[in-house]
Every structure is written in C-alpha cells, then in structure tokens.
Amino acid sequence: MSHGWRDRILATLMAMAGVVLTFWVYSHFISGLHLGRGLKSLYLRVVLVFFTGVFSFVVFGLLERQQRELERANAELGRQRDVLQGLWDATGVVATLPDLEAVLQRIVDVARPLFGAQYAALAVLSDEDPSRIREFITSGISSEARAKIGHLPTGRGLLGEVIRTKQVIRLENIADHPASSGFPNEHPAMSSFLGLPLLYQGSVVGHLYLTNKPGGFTSEDEVLAQLFSRQAAVVIANARLYQEREAWATVQERERIGRELHDGVLQTLYGLTLSLEFLLDTQESLSEDLRRELNRVTETLSLTMTDIRMYIQSLGTSPVDFYVAVKDMLHRTGNGENVDLEFHDHDYLTLDPQIVHDLVLTVQEAVSNANRHGQADRIVVGWESTEWEYHLWIEDNGVGFDTEADTGKHHFGLENMRRRMERLKGMMDVTSAPGRGTTVQFRWPRSNTISL
Ligand SMILES: Nc1ncnc2c1ncn2[C@@H]1O[C@H](COP(=O)(O)OP(=O)(O)OP(=O)(O)O)[C@@H](O)[C@H]1O
Ligand SMILES: [Mg+2]
C-alpha cells in the first residue's frame, strides 16, 4: 500500500475516532453530571475542540511528511537531470576533443562530481588480454600523487572482480570485499566504492569506478550510474570509431605524399645526376676545377636522394628497424668509423616509423657533435628499454664542454633534439664536463596514451 493511501485512511480513522470519542465522553461523563445545560454544552465544546486539535495536529503532520517526500523526489529528479545534462555535455564535446584519451578524461571528470565521489577512474582493457587494464584514467587525484603510486592497477583485485563478473559492485568499504587485495603504499585511502562495466552492444568497452562518497553510495546512485555508463559507452565507442577513421585518412594522405615524392621529386633528381654524369663522361675539355665541382654536386644530389628515400620510408606504416636505420645513417654520412652500437634488447622493433625517423636524426646530430666538437675517438650509441620506457644514449670520450655555459645563437643541434623528445613526452639529459667526455641521454614512455 502506498504512503498516500495509508495516510488518507489514517486521517479518516482519526476523524471518525474523534467523533466517536466525543460522543463517548459526552454520554459517559458529561450527560450524567448534575450540571446546567449551559455548562454541559461548554464541556462538550471543550472536548470537541480538544479532539479537533489532536486531529489537526496528526493530519498536518502527515501533510508535512508528504511534502518532504515530494521535495526528496524532486531533488532526485533534479539529480537525474544533472546526470543527463552531464552526459549531454560529455557527448557534445566529443567532436571537439582531439583524441580518445581526452574523451575518457572528460567522462571521468563529469562522473566524479555527479555522484559526489572523491575519486573516479575509467579503465580501458587491453585488446590482447581483456582481463588486463591497458589505460587507467583518473579524476580527483593529482598527477604527482599518481606518479608516486607508480604503476597501473593490474586488474587482479577488486577491479578485476568487476571486469570478470561484468556486474555492478557497490560497497560500503572496499576492504570488506573478499576480492580486495589491498592498496600500494602511496595509494590514497579509499572506503566506499561503486564499480560498473561500460557495455556497448553487449561488449565491454571500459569500466567506471567511483570511490569515497561521504555517507556511501545509495541504490539510486547505482541505478543512475548504470544509466550513465550506458551513455558513456556509446560516447567511447563513437570516439573510437572517429579515431580509427582519422587514422585511416592520415595513412592515406601520408602514402599519397610518399608516392608524389618518389615519382616526382626523386625521379627529377635522378635525371639530374644522370645528366651530370653524362657531362662528365663525354666532355673531355672540362677543366679539373669544374670536374671536381660537378662531382661534388653529384655527391650532394645522391645524399639528398637518400634523405628523401629515408623520409618516404618514415611516412609509411610498415615497421622500420631502428638499428639498421642508424647503421645506414652512419655509413651514409661517413661518421661511423669510431661508433659502437650497444643495443641491449630488441624492443626498438616496436617503434613507429615516424619516431624512428626522428631518432635517427637525433643520433646523427649527437654523433656529429661528438666528432666535430668533441674530437672523440670512441662513441657509443646505446639502447635499452623497461616495461615503462625506452632509453637511448650517445656517449663519447671527447673533450666535453660546460653544459651551463651559454653557447649563444645559431646552435640548433641540441635544441632540435630537445624538441623531438618533447614531442614524445620524454626527457633529454646532457652530462658533460671539460676533459671528461659527453653523454646525451633520452628517455620516453613506451605508450603515449598512458599519461603517468
Ligand atoms: N659531444 C660534444 N662534445 C663537445 N662539445 C659539444 C658536444 N655536443 C655539443 N657540444 C657543444 O655544445 C654546443 C652546442 O651544440 P649544438 O649541436 O646545439 O650546436 P652546434 O653543433 O654548434 O651547431 P649546429 O648543431 O646547429 O650545427 C656546441 O657548439 C659545442 O660547443
Ligand atoms: Mg651540432
């Protein structure tokens, strides 16, 4: 029975009971008394007024309760509207956001205040192993605090439970759940928890986790979160589609530029070298000076053609072997006699062709600096990688230099290297001192989509 009916019956019974009681009091107590009619009717009125008062008190109490319930329902409706508005905002910005990561970030940033959570996170699963977390986007936690925690959740503990069961999990306290495996040391304290899968057309596109709502999450939060997650899943699926289309268009465009360069510019240059060689072969009358000059031009042309070929290769999407590319560059520039390559693993095979192109130019500049400025007789190009980052270094035993000293304008080498590393969200570090050789080091994260 609804509250409304109960209250109505209660109020009616109260009124009836009031009338019955008034009569009962009158017939049992007042009518038997030896009093004047005036006094009797006065007593009767007093009793009536008393019961009317009690009746009103109860009925108004009931009304007030209904009013409060209405207000609560209104607030809940308002919240649902906020959730929908938040979702709408999130959907609206998708078209203007540069990449999937920004879309994911937007979704957690919207979800966190909507549900009154202190922290929110969105996990995207690995394509190869859908029980592992590939990306973990957070809201409410500073990037320094995140860096301190160190690694992504592995998907083994409680988060893994949400992943495995594809069910909503709502908890008063995370630690109470049997699957909870505890937190790393630097992890912020977390108690209340709401975790749910984001399902799009039956498949999981990610997971949403909300924690630390003061007072805990309610069953209404759970219902709303499910509504939110359905919409968020659509948003993510759309963003992915958009990204794939963009990537495809980029590949097409790069291939087109590559073809133009190959069939146009490269062929023209090739024609030029042929003409020059023909001249050199047939014109016996050329002076020695002119001959030398023409030979130099032919050589420069052929170097330029190698450069263009390398550039065309970098435009493609097929993997380029960084080790081979460095060797090739050293040979081509005639800079490699005193260079040793010390590559500690084969992870350079996973590098993007465009990145390989940048890195080869970086090594080229560092080796040329070591030879030109350092007069080094031994140079080492080193490579190694960890689970999280790549590490590349160029070490020489040359004269070294003061890294603090202002080299002035017109020095672009080191600056270019730094810029290239910034593009990879990595770091460059130069260690050198006069007489002690120079080491230039580069470190950059393995995946640019995970921002730790
Ligand atoms: N390996 C090295 N050994 C000794 N000195 C170095 C080395 N690398 C850089 N330097 C010093 O740092 C300066 C800046 O190097 P950078 O590569 O930026 O410019 P550059 O080589 O002088 O000019 P550019 O590279 O633009 O042709 C150099 O002029 C040199 O004095
Ligand atoms: Mg230089």
Image: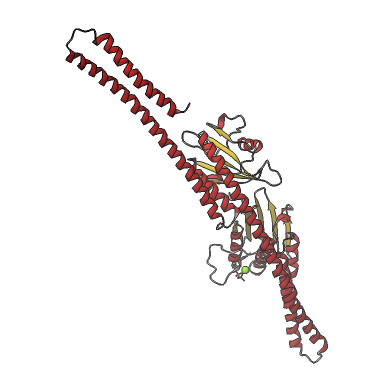
Left/right placement of residue 387 relative to residue 42 reads right
Residue for point 53% across, 65% down = 405
Compare residues 62 and 294 and report the one nearer the observer: 62
Estimate the x, y position of residue 410 in percent, counting from the top left.
56, 72
* Vertical arrangement, residue 317 with respect to residue 218, above or below: below
Q: Residue furthest front?
A: 37
Count of labels in the image: 0
Estimate the x, y position of residue 46 in percent, counting from the top left.
23, 18
Residue for point 55% across, 50% down = 105
Compare residues 202 and 66 and report the one nearer the observer: 66
Determine if residue 372 is in view.
Answer: yes
Which color scheme does this rendered protein use? secondary structure
Estimate the x, y position of residue 94 in percent, counting from the top left.
56, 54
Residue for point 80% across, 83% down = 277
State ligand 1's quadrant: bottom right
Estimate the x, y position of residue 151 in percent, counting from the top left.
61, 44
Determine if residue 432 is in view.
Answer: no
Left/right placement of residue 285 relative to residue 385 reads right
Left/right placement of residue 150 relative to residue 72 reads right
* Vertical arrangement, residue 78 with respect to residue 280, above or below: above
Left/right placement of residue 369 relative to residue 62 reads right
* Vertical arrangement, residue 129 with respect to residue 384, above or below: above
Q: Residue furthest bottom?
A: 285
Among the 4 quarters of the image, the one containing residue 298: bottom right
